Every structure is written in structure tokens, then in C-alpha cells.
Image (cartoon, helix red, strand yellow):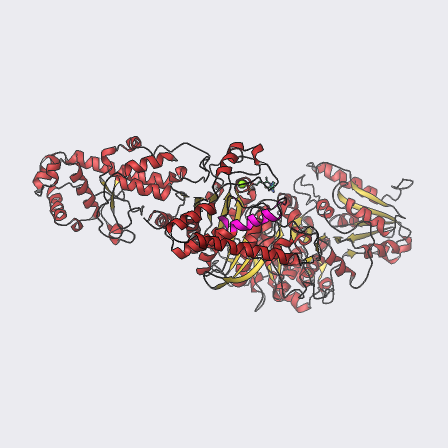
């Protein structure tokens, strides 16, 4: 660090700046100059030509091209003093100088090349020596090594074949640098000084990995142009006022609740003015909605001073006696979200700000924010992100360590997932809980992950508020100009422990000794502005007192609050969907069936190509012909059932979005929602979008190969509007576990924690089909284990029980056995007066099984989703004679039905399908159990005993029959892996449990 200061003194010793010719930024001559790219004249081969140029140059330096100007200046500088003033060319060019011209020219070329390399070295590596750490003890890049090509001491000039005598020589500047400002040549001493200023001060920029020349030039211009970082008095005063708020807010909380966890911002107070600068700059560029996600650190401060949540509402959260009125279990204060609409004081424009609620799981909220942002952009027709944008905040350790950060970056440029540039702000306090960065990451910076998408990275010393404001401004302008991600790395420190109760000296003693000595940024900045005469001490103190008073008054009024409303912390309100009190407008659901003409129209579209002259693959033709044939027979398979659901919802103005890996075709090649012209590259057609005049749009998009990131994204998308069916499909159901955090922390518990509804649908292919352990189970047991319906409580039936029960559950888990029921449940999802996540275990082999087709009649007007499908044969007609009732769900039904037929046991054994597993259809199961009062009750599943549904259904069956009848288990034995990898073992297992299912003596004499 200090090496620079020393050198700067030496370098600044002498030398003026070369005289300018023309402005450099848009000089047309640069583009068509005959000089080489390296900025050198095509060295004279003809002395008369050189003479001619030389005379012209002597007359006026502007008479020649800038490259010649540099050339002659250098010759002059390297000639003995007597000849330097020689006006005759012969003396200079034909005399000693010219006699040495090959050597001299060679030297000039080499020196220019060297200087250009030097400039490039600073552009690439200057950030490594920038003074980023406010504490002055750490290296932000975890490396104290100073790159050998940066000129930190005079002797390092030798690296380039230069020495001290070259410092005052002028050099032509390359077109890839803006350090000259209006100048095209500069003495080397000045070049180095300016490079130091641009690249090695309190800002360290990383951008040279960006492949786009315009973008790199844009950044250079923003950081290299001399004197570009300037603020007016008014801007400085605003910055100071914001710093006062940020600092005094934390001080106030610390004073009032000294033993409460709040994850204070102390050491990075500049985050608040930083965010406000980003928002101001974006607002003036036309942005009117900003969606933010952030971790714990400084969250209350952001709510108070950026979103402007009422302070008394925040202070209420610290009152342990206040109880929440709303349903749900709530969340800790530093996880809650917020939505606020207000006027931006700097731009006088309206702006909506929302901070998304999030779990402790660091970075999990990133894709969710992106999804919500994309949805808002989509519904507003903001196709380039000019109105709606996202800001993501990160901790240094989490940003480097959490894989979902990488997954989120990889969504940033995909057409159906791009939010057209996110501004990332890292609160880089150079520690993660108790862990030093050098053992927390392998990359030099915590931000290196952003390099994969060519996002520029601005590291900045957080104790220099003006430098921070500048990079924030540039970051916002970057987004406006290029609609790409950008990262601001606020290199700071954490004044206290991880939270206010923690002792940091246990693990970081030296760092914390330094931190104790560290002057507060507010003190440093206010002193600076007082010295500069921007504010007086009195003005500063008045501003502090003013904010303290605001806090005190809010504190007093917070004591009047009697109850807490979690609803006030909602980040995505749907005002028109609910009543003013936030309740559903009804507690019923209309039938989900469809008129015949709608079914026919959708069926026709699903079976044809709507565009002329569009050649599809013969295999797809066959599939479409098959659909047409089914429609003729008034039948549908799975793909048609899905078509009916999507197509009818689109007609009703509901946007449908289906996202996931290979969903356009469908993993099992059954869907084909995007047709590809076999003769014209990239010509595609989505018939679903051409179904009806004035229909809602249909989005079907193959995603990146991510589950955590993409499911998070779709969950966020589903937050934006209740009038959309948002579906995420796993390639195979198994893969949902790499998105477990989204499932656990958001989907199953989101409403309980944050009182917000979400209607996301998960399609999880599931079924034991001999495909091995990893392509078989979507892990139903896990979803069911997280369902909140009470296994031991028989609910009271009143009103519309089905809807009432759905309203109270945390999510819905279904395993449909027919296409019609699949269609119904998708439609019910939208026709319900509230939104709940829906988990659907979807079939694989049933997609094509003839027995698993539905009649169009099953979807006729007036029909509804069947939570339970009773036995449909002889057993149901004479229930008194039935000896055994097999309850099951999903695909195994067809195996059971086939076996029963083969064994001719249709009168002895009833088979009942549970289509909605959770919430458990207590009412319908009781009806069936009572209907077959003499029969044995069995639960049959193809999954292993410790998996599947058994553990969930067993206690609920017992509740239904009041523990008076046993419910026997038939299925695979307990196991560690979800399925065998051996086909014949698979078939043997199946045969074994089928035999048991139809062996009426199997449970005779057995104890319960
Ligand atoms: C996914 C996840 N793993 C672990 C934790 C526990 N945890 C909470 S804060 C923290 C350290 C975070 O460090 P950093 O990201 O640098 O943020 P800082 O607290 O320094 O602001 C850890 C490990 C967590 N919240 N989430
Ligand atoms: Mg940290």
C-alpha cells in the first residue's frame, strides 16, 4: 500500500503534460489513422517524407498526426540539447539523430510498446494494489504480492526496459485509455500518476475479462478520465445526511436494546447511502420499481432508511410482549419483507420498493428476487428492464461459498429468465461469522463468481463514502447502458461480533484491536466536509439531533402499539385478489369442468400445426395424429389433459408459465409444446399461443440445468400475480432435492412465516419402473412429512370442507391417476379463492398407458377434481361382499387392477385411489371405510415401506376408523435406496407384493 505513496512523490517531481491536439474520445482520425494499432507511426522509410513531416511539425505541432507528434517529441527529448532546438532537418534527421535513426526509432517503438503494456498492466491488475481495506491490515484479494508489472518503485521501470530518465519523455496514449483526458500524449511520470489515481486508489476495478470492447471502453472512460469523480456541495450534504441516518439508526437500536440481536451494519454504514444512490440514479433513468433481496446484516437499517418502513413498526418488533394477530407463526425481525410505494426525493418520481422476506439460508432469496422481478417486467410489458430492476445484497462469505449464487448468475442472460441486469452489492466485512476469508474461499475476491457472466466488479473502500457513491452511480448507469449484471464490493469491516452478543476477540484478536482504534466513517466524513467548508459543525450536529429526535418519537409511539401485524410486512401484496383485510373473497371453488366446444377446440389445436408451410418431424406428426385419433374417440392421454388445463386457463386470461429442464418437448417426449421446423433453423411454433383471440400468453421455457436456482426463480415469479399458473417441472422427481432449501424454507413454510400466498406447482415425475435408484422416487415421504394437517384429529365438516381444508393447509400434495383429474387439479389451483403450493407426482409410463386415458366426459362442464376415486367396478356395487379394500395412489393402481382382473377377484377386492394425499380427505376415506365395513383395509404402495405415503396415511386412517380397524401394509420392504438397480429384482419385488395384496389370508391371525 505505502509503496505507492512513496513512488507517487518521486514521480510527481517534475514534468508537464504534453500539449493537446484534439479530443480523444471521438476523434475520427483515430479510426482511419494509418498508424498501427499500437499507436506508433509507420516508421519513416523515406527521409524526405520524414523531413516534410518534421518541417510541418516545427511550424505547428498540430500540423501532423498525433502519432508523428509523439515521435518528434521523443526524438527531440532523446537528442543532445544543442540539437533539440535545431530548426534544420538535416541537423536533426541527417546529422547525428538521423544517423542513429534506426536505433532511435527502434527505441521509440520499444518504449511506446512498453508504456502501452504498462497502461494495460494497470487496467488488468491495478486493483490488486488498490487501497481497499479501511483497516489497512488486510489485502482484499488475499494476496500481499504486488504484481511485478505495476510500477511501485522506480527500479520496477526496468521491467519494461525503461528507467528514470524516461519519466519525463512524452508517450503517445493508446486509444484504449482515457487517462489523457484532452491530451493524446503524456510524460511517463504523469501516465503512471494517473494510472495510480484511476486504478490503485480507493477504487479497484475488475473489467478486463469483459469480451465486449464497447463495454470495456465505457468503463475505462468512467474511471480513467481525469477529474471525473466530483460531487457538488449539495450532493455531499445529501451523502452526509444519509450517513448520519444509517449510523444513528444503529446507535439508537444499540442504546435501546443492547442485548438484542439485530446484525448491525456498523463498519459498513455506507451501505445505506450506496443503495440510495443506486436507486436515485436508476430512478432518473426511468426505473420505477426496485425489488431487493438481502441477508441479515443491516436489514433493519435498509427497511428504515431505504424502504422507509415506519420506525415505530420496526421498533415494535423488539417488544417481546406483543403478539401477532395474523395467522401463521411469523418470523424474526431481520427476515421480514416489506413493500412500499413513495416519491423519490432526488428525482421527484414515484417509486415502488420491495424487500423480499427470506430465510436464514444465505443467498437462497437470490433467484426468488430474480423471478419476481422477471414477472413484474413480464406483466408490465417491460421487455428490456427499463422500469423494473432488482438489487441483490450479499455477505462476502456467503457470496463466495453458496452455489446458488452461481446458479443465479447463470440465469441472468437467458431470455426467459433475464432481468436485464442486477446490481449486486457485497457487504464485504472481510469475515464470515468467525471465519477468515483465507479459509473461506479459494478465489482472490469474494466476487469472482460474477466473472462468469462478464459482469464488471467494482471494489471500493467503504470508508471513502464519495468513492462508494461514485461506483454506485456508475453501476446504475452501467445497467441502464448495457442491461447486464454488475457487482459493487464494499470492502469494509464489522465493528462488533457476528451479532451483538458475539465476542470477536476470541478468533480475530488483531483485527479487532485495529477495529477498536478505527475512527467511525461518519466522523471521518463529517470532519472532511467541515474542513472543506461544505457544512459547519453546527449544521452537522443539528442534522444528527434531528434524526435522533425522529427515532425517539417513533420509539415513544411504538409503545402505543398493542398488536403486531405480520401482514404489514408483506413484500408482495395482491390487493385486488383478497378483501381489504387480506382474506379470501369466498370459501368455495366453482366446478373445474369445461364446455364441449372448448375441449374440442383445444384438442384440435393440440393435434395440428397452426402455421402454413411448417415442416415438423415425422415422429411429431405421428404424435399429433395420435392426439387427433384420441379426440375422435372422445379420449385424452396425459399430454392432452395438460393441454386442456393450460389452454382453458389461457382462454380465461390466466398466464401459464412452464419452466424446467427440457420441458418444451418434455423429458418423456410426450408434450411437444414447441414445434421445430425441420427445414428452417430456429423456426419454431408454440400452438398454445395461437389458441384464442385475446388469450393470455403461454410461456414454456427450457431452463438451465439447475434446480435450486430455477425453482427459486419460479417461486418468485409466482409471487408477482395470483392470476398466473406457474409450474416448475423436475426432469425426474428425484432432482427436487437439490432445490430442498426452496422447498423447505419457502414453499412449505412461506405462508406461515410471511403470510403470503403462493400458487406454484411442482411437477415431479415419480414411479418405480425398474429405472434404478435415481430415476424412480420424487420422495413423496418428504413432502408429506412437512404437511401440516393433524394426523390425530378428525376435522369437523362444515361449509365447503374441501376448500376449507385447503385453506388451512400449507400445501397440497396429489398423485393423479388420470389425465382428467390432472387437468382438474391444475384448474382448481386457479379457481380457488386463495393460493397454495401444489405438489404433483406425475407419471412416466402412464403417459402412454391406454388404461390411463380419460374420457372427455370426465372433463365435462360441472365436473370437478376427485380427491378420491372410489372403486369403479363390481366391488362397489355390492360392498357388503367385499373382503378387502386396497387403498393406493398413483401408478400402482393400474398394476393392482390388472392383477385383480387376472385373479378374477373384482367382487372380493375393492381398489380405491387417493388422488389428493394431503390434506388428507378424511371425509371421503371415512365414507369408503364405512361403505366396506366388513372388509379388511390395506394400504398398498410400490415404494419401500419407509418411503412413499405409508407413514403419512397410517395415522390418518387410524383416526378415520377411530383405531377400531387395522390398516395393513402391502408394498416393498424398508430400504436405504429408493429403488433397486436390477430389473429382475424390481419385477420380483413387484410380484411379491402383488401376491400379498390379493392373498386374502395374508393377514389372518396377525397382530395389529
Ligand atoms: C446457507 C447458510 N449456511 C450457514 C448459515 C449460518 N450463518 C449465518 S451468518 C453466517 C456468516 C455469513 O458471513 P457473510 O456472508 O460474510 O455475512 P456477514 O455476517 O459477515 O455480514 C453464517 C455461516 C446460514 N445462515 N445460511
Ligand atoms: Mg462477512
Residue 679 visible here = no
Residue closest to the far front: 538
The quadrant where ligand 1 appears is top right
Residue 714 visible here = yes
Which residue appears at 65% of the width and 61% of the height?
644
Residue 687 location, quadrant: bottom right
Seen in the image, is 581 located left or right of residue 220? right
Q: Quadrant of the C terminus?
A: top right
Q: Indicate the position of residue 983 as horizontal and vertical percent values.
A: 70, 38
Seen in the image, is 307 located left or right of residue 466? right
Q: Quadrant of the N terminus?
A: top left
Q: Indicate the position of residue 291 as horizontal and vertical percent values.
A: 54, 55
Q: Nearer the viewer, residue 413 or 83?
A: 83
Q: Indicate the position of residue 679 as horizontal and vertical percent values.
A: 48, 55
Membership of 949 in magenta stretch = no
Membership of 263 in magenta stretch = yes
Q: Nearer the viewer, residue 133 or 27?
A: 133
Which residue appears at 44% of the width and 44% of the height?
460
Seen in the image, is 553 located left or right of residue 222? right
Q: Which residues are magenta?
A: 246-272
Q: Indicate the position of residue 313 as horizontal and vertical percent values.
A: 62, 56
Q: Is residue 290 above or below residue 89?
A: below
Q: Nearer the viewer, residue 3 or 311?
A: 311
Total residue callouts: 0
Amino acid at each position: 500500500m505505502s509503496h505507492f505513496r512513496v513512488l507517487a512523490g518521486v514521480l510527481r517531481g517534475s514534468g508537464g503534460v504534453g500539449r493537446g491536439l484534439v479530443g480523444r474520445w471521438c476523434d475520427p482520425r483515430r479510426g482511419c489513422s494509418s498508424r498501427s494499432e499500437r499507436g506508433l507511426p509507420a516508421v519513416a522509410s523515406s527521409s524526405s517524407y520524414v523531413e516534410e513531416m518534421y518541417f510541418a511539425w516545427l511550424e505547428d505541432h498540430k500540423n501532423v498526426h498525433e502519432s508523428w507528434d509523439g515521435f518528434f517529441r521523443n526524438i527531440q527529448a532523446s537528442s543532445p540539447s544543442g540539437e533539440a532546438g535545431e530548426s534544420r532537418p538535416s541537423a536533426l534527421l541527417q546529422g547525428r539523430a538521423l544517423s542513429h535513426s534506426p536505433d532511435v526509432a527502434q527505441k521509440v517503438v520499444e518504449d511506446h510498446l512498453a508504456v502501452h503494456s504498462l497502461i494495460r498492466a494497470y487496467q488488468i491488475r491495478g486493483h490488486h494494489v488498490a487501497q481497499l481495506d479501511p483497516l489497512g491490515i488486510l489485502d482484499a484479494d488475499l494476496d500481499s504480492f504486488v504484481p511485478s508489472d505495476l510500477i511501485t518503485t522506480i527500479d520496477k521501470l526496468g521491467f519494461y526496459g525503461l528507467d528514470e530518465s524516461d519519466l519525463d519523455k512524452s508517450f503517445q496514449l493508446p486509444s484504449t485509455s482515457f487517462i489523457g483526458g484532452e491530451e493524446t500524449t503524456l510524460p511517463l511520470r504523469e501516465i503512471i500518476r494517473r494510472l495510480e489515481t484511476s486504478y490503485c486508489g480507493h477504487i479497484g476495478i475488475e473489467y478486463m475479462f469483459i469480451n465486449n470492447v464497447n463495454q470495456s471502453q465505457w468503463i475505462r472512460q468512467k474511471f480513467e478520465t481525469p477529474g471525473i469523480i466530483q460531487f457538488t456541495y449539495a450532493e455531499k450534504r445529501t451523502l452526509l445526511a444519509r450517513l448520519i441516518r444509517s449510523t444513528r439508526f444503529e446507535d439508537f437500536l444499540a442504546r435501546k436494546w443492547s442485548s438484542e440481536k439485530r446484525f448491525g451494519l456498523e463498519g459498513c454504514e455506507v451501505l445505506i447511502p450506496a443503495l440510495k444512490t443506486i436507486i436515485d440514479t436508476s430512478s432518473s433513468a426511468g426505473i420505477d420499481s426496485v425489488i431487493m433481496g438481502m441477508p441479515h446484516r443491516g436489514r433493519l437499517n435498509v427497511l428504515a432508511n431505504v424502504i422507509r418502513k415506519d420506525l415505530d413498526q420496526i421498533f415494535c418488533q423488539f417488544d417481546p410482549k406483543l403478539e401477532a394477530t395474523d395467522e401463521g407463526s411469523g418470523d424474526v425481525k431481520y427476515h421480514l419483507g416489506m413493500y412500499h410505494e413513495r416519491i423519490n426525493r432526488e428525482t421527484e418520481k414515484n417509486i415502488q420498493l420491495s424487500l423480499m422476506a427470506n430465510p436464514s439460508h444465505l443467498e437462497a432469496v437470490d433467484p426468488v428476487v430474480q423471478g419476481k422481478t422477471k414477472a413484474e417486467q413480464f406483466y408490465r410489458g417491460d421487455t428490456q428492464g427499463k422500469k423494473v430492476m432488482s438489487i441483490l445484497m450479499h455477505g462476502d462469505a456467503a457470496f463466495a461459498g453458496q452455489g446458488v449464487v452461481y446458479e443465479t448468475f447463470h440465469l441472468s442472460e437467458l431470455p426467459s429468465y433475464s432481468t436485464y441486469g442486477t446490481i449486486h452489492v457485497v457487504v464485504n466485512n472481510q469475515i464470515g461469522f468467525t471465519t477468515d476469508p483465507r479459509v473461506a474461499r479459494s478465489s482472490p475476491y469474494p466476487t469472482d463468481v460474477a466473472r462468469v457472466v462478464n459482469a464488471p466488479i467494482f471494489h471500493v473502500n467503504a470508508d471513502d463514502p464519495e468513492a462508494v457513491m461514485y461506483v454506485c452511480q456508475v453501476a446504475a448507469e452501467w445497467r441502464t447502458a448495457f442491461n447486464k449484471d454488475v457487482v459493487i464490493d464494499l470492502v469494509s469491516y464489522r465493528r462488533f461480533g457476528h451479532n451483538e452478543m458475539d465476542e470477536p476477540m476470541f478468533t480475530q484478536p488483531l483485527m479487532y484491536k485495529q477495529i477498536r482504534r478505527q475512527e467511525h466513517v461518519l466522523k471521518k466524513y463529517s470532519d472532511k466536509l467541515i474542513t472543506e467548508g461544505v457544512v459547519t459543525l453546527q449544521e452537522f450536529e443539528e442534522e444528527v439531533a434531528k434524526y435522533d429526535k425522529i427515532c425517539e418519537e417513533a420509539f415513544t409511539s411504538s409503545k402505543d402499539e398493542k398488536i403486531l401485524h405480520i401482514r404489514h410486512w408483506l413484500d408482495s401484496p395482491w390487493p385486488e385478489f383478497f378483501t381489504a383485510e387480506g382474506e379470501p373473497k369466498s370459501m368455495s371453488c366453482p366446478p373445474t369442468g369445461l364446455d364441449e366446444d372448448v375441449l374440442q377446440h383445444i384438442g384440435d389445436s393440440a393435434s395440428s400445426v397452426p402455421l402454413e408451410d411448417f415442416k415438423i418431424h415425422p415422429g411429431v406428426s405421428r404424435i399429433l395424429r395420435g392426439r387427433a385419433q384420441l379426440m375422435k374417440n372422445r379420449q385424452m392421454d396425459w399430454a392432452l389433459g395438460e393441454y386442456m388445463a393450460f389452454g382453458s386457463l389461457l382462454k380465461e386470461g390466466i398466464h401459464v408459465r412452464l419452466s424446467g429442464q427440457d420441458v418444451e418437448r418434455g423429458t418423456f417426449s410426450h408434450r411437444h409444446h414447441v414445434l421445430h421446423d425441420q427445414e428452417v433453423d430456429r423456426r419454431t411454433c408454440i400452438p398454445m399461443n395461437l389458441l384464442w383471440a385475446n388469450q393470455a400468453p403461454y410461456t414454456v421455457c427450457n431452463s438451465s440445468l439447475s434446480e435450486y436456482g430455477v425453482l427459486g426463480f419460479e417461486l418468485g415469479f409466482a409471487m408477482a400475480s395470483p392470476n398466473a399458473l406457474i409450474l416448475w417441472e423436475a426432469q425426474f422427481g428425484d432432482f427436487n432435492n437439490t432445490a430442498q432449501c426452496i422447498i423447505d424454507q419457502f414453499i412449505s413454510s412461506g405462508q406461515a412465516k410471511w403470510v403470503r400466498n403462493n400458487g406454484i406447482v411442482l411437477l415431479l415425475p415419480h414411479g418405480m419402473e425398474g429405472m434404478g435408484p435415481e430415476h424412480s422416487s420424487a420422495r413423496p415421504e418428504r413432502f408429506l412429512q412437512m404437511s401440516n394437517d393433524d394426523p390425530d384429529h378428525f376435522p369437523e365438516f362444515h361449509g365447503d370442507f374441501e376448500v376449507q381444508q385447503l385453506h388451512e393447509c400449507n400445501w397440497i400434495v396429489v398423485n393423479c391417476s388420470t389425465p382428467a383429474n390432472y387437468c382438474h387439479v391444475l384448474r382448481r389451483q386457479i379457481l380457488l379463492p386463495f393460493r397454495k403450493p401444489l405438489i404433483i407426482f406425475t407419471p412416466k409410463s402412464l403417459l402412454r398407458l391406454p388404461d390411463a386415458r380419460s374420457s372427455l366426459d370426465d372433463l365435462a362442464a360441472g365436473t370437478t377434481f376427485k380427491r378420491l376415486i372410489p372403486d369403479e367396478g363390481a366391488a362397489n356395487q355390492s360392498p357388503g361382499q367385499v373382503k378387502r379394500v386396497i387403498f393406493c395412489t398413483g401408478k400402482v393402481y393400474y398394476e393392482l387392477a390388472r392383477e385383480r382382473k387376472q385373479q378374477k377377484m373384482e367382487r372380493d377386492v375393492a381398489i380405491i385411489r387417493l388422488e389428493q394425499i394431503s390434506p388428507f380427505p378424511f371425509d371421503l376415506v371415512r365414507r369408503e371405510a364405512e361403505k366396506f365395513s366388513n372388509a379388511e383395509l390395506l394400504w398398498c404402495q410400490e415404494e419401500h415401506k419407509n418411503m412413499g405415503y405409508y407413514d403419512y396415511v397410517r395415522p390418518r386412517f387410524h383416526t378415520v376408523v377411530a383405531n377400531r380397524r387395522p390398516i395393513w401394509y402391502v408394498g416393498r420392504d424398508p430400504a436405504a435406496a429408493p429403488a433397486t438397480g436390477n430389473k429382475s429384482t424390481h419385477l420380483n419385488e413387484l410380484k411379491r407384493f402383488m401376491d400379498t395384496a390379493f392373498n386374502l389370508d395374508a393377514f389372518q391371525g396377525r397382530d395389529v
